[in-house]
Amino acid sequence: MLLKNDKAALSVLAVLAAISLIVPVCNLVFAPGSPLYFSSYTVSLLGKYLTFALLGMSLDLVWGYCGILALGHGAFFALGGYAMGMYLMRQIGSRGVYGDPLLPDFMVFLNWKELPWYWHGFEQFWFAAIMIFLVPGVLAFLFGWLAFRSRVTGVYLSIITQALTYALLLAFFRNEMGFGGNNGLTDFKEILGFNSQSDSVRACLLMASGLILMLAFLVSRWIVNSKLGRVVTAIRDQEMRVRFLGYRVEMFKLWIFVFAAMLAGIAGALYVPQVGIINPSEFSPLNSLEIVIWVAIGGRGTLYGAIVGAVLVNYAKTLLTGWMPEIWLFFLGATFILVTVLLPDGLVGFWQRRLQEQKQ
Amino acid sequence: MNGIALKPGQVDVSHGPILYLEDVSVSFDGFKALNNLSLYIDAGELRCLIGPNGAGKTTLMDVITGKTRPDTGSVFFGQTIDLLQMDEPAIAQAGICRKFQKPSVFDMLSVFENLELALATDKGAWATLFAKLNGAQRDRIEQVLETIGLVELRSQPAGILSHGQKQWLEIGMLLMQEPKVMLVDEPIAGMTHQEVERTAELLLSLQGERSIVVVEHDMEFVRSIAKHVTVLHEGSVLTEGSMDEVQNDPRVIQVYLGD
């Protein structure tokens, strides 16, 4: 029902299913050298792309559907990442360089004697799993409550979302914050009792990223197809009119903003064990701008456009930064401008129009 | 945000009027858009507001619907509901609904979905997420589709409608909200002659059940529907009365024709 007659959405789901099932299985079952073998490098790369895809899709809910150009969406990704990072740090236990059973290395280094209160609970996976979406959700709620109720919109809202992530960047750089400062959290050993560097854990993380992305896609699709989804699109197009129909616009914006922030947090939590580190640079405003570019290039307001955009742009980034790192930002900027000017509906919009023209 | 003393949905009209505006003034950067305006709209009446450009007609609607806060004065819905304590969604839910001068329907949504969004129901975010139309609500949408003559275009996006059809759709959206007061700003702009006649019939058929305030420039149209006309000029009421009285009032003639 949810996907009836939507070939694009079905194909994206099929590709995702293939990536998240076949690639990890082939990585584990076949030996290197076999034509069916996918290297562990490919596995962790794809896993990373899928978390970016989830992040991009969550921004599409806010920007593509509700018209809120959030330029600080990376903050929620980073917070989810830190929550996961804290769990992974606590798993290190006494295997750290300083061998302290309770305190992570950076705290011993700073001469801290006690674990800060907000680090308690993170030794439990279930607790961390809740914090992964609760912390971004609460921040999004407080921020959105203040911003949307005061009817801050457009460029002003974009600027303060950017300021939010910049403020967090500065805060997390400080050692006194207790999140490892400049270096962030790293040197992870175990996740759920398994060696987090091992091939099988990497394969499982790719699988988990793919499955969670597919689930999030289906739930998001259900939301945008619901009446709430139609109100949200209506707000994007004519906010004033929606108010006069009796809807509290700020509540709908808040709802979708908080939901998207939670998805971004989950994406961050899946990202951190796959790259093995989380540091304050994830809060950098540039990262948030990149997410916007993925969505614009893929195509706004379709959900799968954001997925396609995130994967393609990051694939290009991997290729280019390996080949000529200095041109990457120029390439990204040029692509963004070209897509905005020539393909306002992004790549998927372009493909859809081509398909329709062929039919006629 | 709550100015409701009676139960929601109950408006005290025991003294006759449903809308009371008293000594309302609004100024924008020194320009007095409304100047000590007082106006009463009776329950169930169809009132036309006319006046030259800049007379304050749209500002008046902005004040009633909560878009603009007046500098002074009071605005009451019935005798008990203070509209100045409420924001736009609260006023809309209390039963004062508005059609805009520029037709503002949601182009991306279908005709049916436009009406569905306007439907009078629980408009909270969670309720909206899980909302499903029941039989009675479906029937109501069908009924309104028929009234506004857009049955065949129900699944088309509203963006493809003609200007006149958009006006009708917006009137339909007003009806879906089951309002007690309808504020209708320039309903016939862009309509064909036939459409104008049907609009007049529709508005006439709705009076009594609800109060309707129509702002319109087309005098012929105003004459065809209005028993009672209020003329605004420079932000206050110049005169009130039947169309004939008003049109023969020398002050009105002077305002419209200039000296």
Image (cartoon, coloured by chain):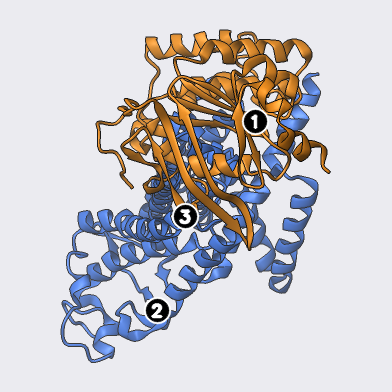
- Which of the chains bears the disc numbered 1? B
Does residue B132 appear left or right of residue A301 in this picture?
left
Q: Quadrant of residue A194?
A: bottom left
Question: The residue under label 1 is which amino acid type?
Answer: Asp
- Give residue B107's mark: 1
Percent across and percent down for residue A295 are 61, 50
- Residue A54 shows in this picture: yes
- Which of the chains bears the disc numbered 3? B
Q: Read off the residue under disc 3.
A: B72
* SS under mark 2: helix
Percent across and percent down for residue B79 are 33, 35
- Which of the chains bears the disc numbered 2? A
Say which of A269 and A250 sits in front: A250
Does residue A180 appear left or right of residue A192 in this picture?
right
Q: Colour of chain A?
A: blue
Cα separation between marks 3 and 2: 47 Å
Q: Chain B is drawn in which colour?
A: orange
Say which of A140 and B61 sits in front: B61
Cα separation between marks 3 and 1: 37 Å
Q: Read off the residue under disc 2.
A: A171
Question: The residue under label 3 is which amino acid type?
Answer: Thr
Q: Residue at x 70, y 42 (%)?
A: A345
Sequence-earlier tag: 3 or 1: 3
Q: Quadrant of residue A293?
A: bottom right
Disc 3: CA contacts within 10 A as few (<14), some (14-19) or many (>=20): some
Say which of A94 and B169 sits in front: B169
* SS under mark 1: loop
Say which of B50 and A59 sits in front: B50
Q: Which residue is drawn at 82% across and 37% down?
A: B257
